[in-house]
Image (cartoon, helix red, strand yellow):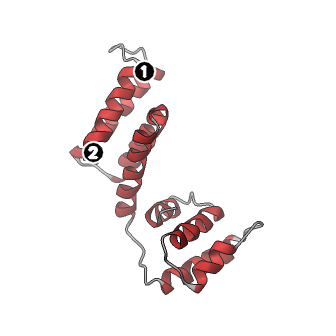
Amino acid sequence: MDTKILYYNRFKSKEMPIDYINWANSMLENDTSTTSLNILASLREPLNIFEIEEYFKRALGELSMTEPSIEECAKHYIRHLLKGILNDKNNAIKLANQIYEVVREHFFNGELEIWYEISEMIDDFRYGDNPRNITHEFLISTIVHETKKQLS
C-alpha cells in the first residue's frame, strides 16, 4: 500500500489494521527498512489497532516522514483510481464514481469538473430516463478517454 493512499484512508477513517501491515510490507519491498517498520510488517492476527498505530508512528519518525495534506493525498488517490480504470475497464464505472466522490469532497476546479458530468451520465444510464440514450460502451469509452487525458 502506498503511503499517500494509506493517509487518505486515515483522513477518511476508512483504514483497516491490515492496511498498515500492507504499507509496511510495501516499504520493505522498496528497500526501506527500520526497526519499527520491520516489527509492523511482522504483526499477525489478531491485530490490535493501537499497537499498529504506535508502530506506524514510530516508523514514520524513524523514516523522517511527515504527514501529507489531505489534498495531496486526494490527488494521489485519484491518480491511483485513474490507473485502475486503465488496468481494468470492467471496473471503470465503479472507479469513476469513486473519483467523483473524491472530487466532490475536495476539489472545485474546472479541470476535474468532468467527473461530475460523468457521474450524471452514469446515473442517467443506471437510474434515469436516459434522455441521451447512453450505452454501456459509450460510458466506458468516455471514462477511459477522460482517464487517458488526465493521466497524460
- Residue 130: x and y in percent read 39, 15
**Identity of the amino acid at label 2?**
Gln
Helix, strand or loop under label 2: helix
Q: Is residue 105 above or below residue 21?
A: above
Helix, strand or loop under label 1: helix
Residue at coordinates 37% horizontally, 57% vertically from top-left?
76
Disc nearer the start of the sequence (2/1): 1
Q: Which residue is disc 2 drawn over?
A: 150
How packed mark 1 is, by other alpha carbons closer than 10 Å (few <14, some 14-19, many 20 or more), is few
Check whether the beta carbons of the residues at disc 2 and disc 1 lie within 8 A of each other. Answer: no
Position of 91 with respect to 150 (left or right) is: right
Q: Is residue 18 above or below residue 117?
A: below
Residue at coordinates 39% horizontally, 63% vertically from top-left?
70
**Identity of the amino acid at label 1?**
His
Q: Which residue is disc 1 drawn over?
A: 136
Q: Is residue 57 above or below residue 87?
A: below
- Residue 23: x and y in percent read 55, 67
Residue at coordinates 47% horizontally, 22% vertically from top-left?
126
Q: Quadrant of residue 47?
A: bottom right
Position of 151 with respect to 13 (left or right) is: left
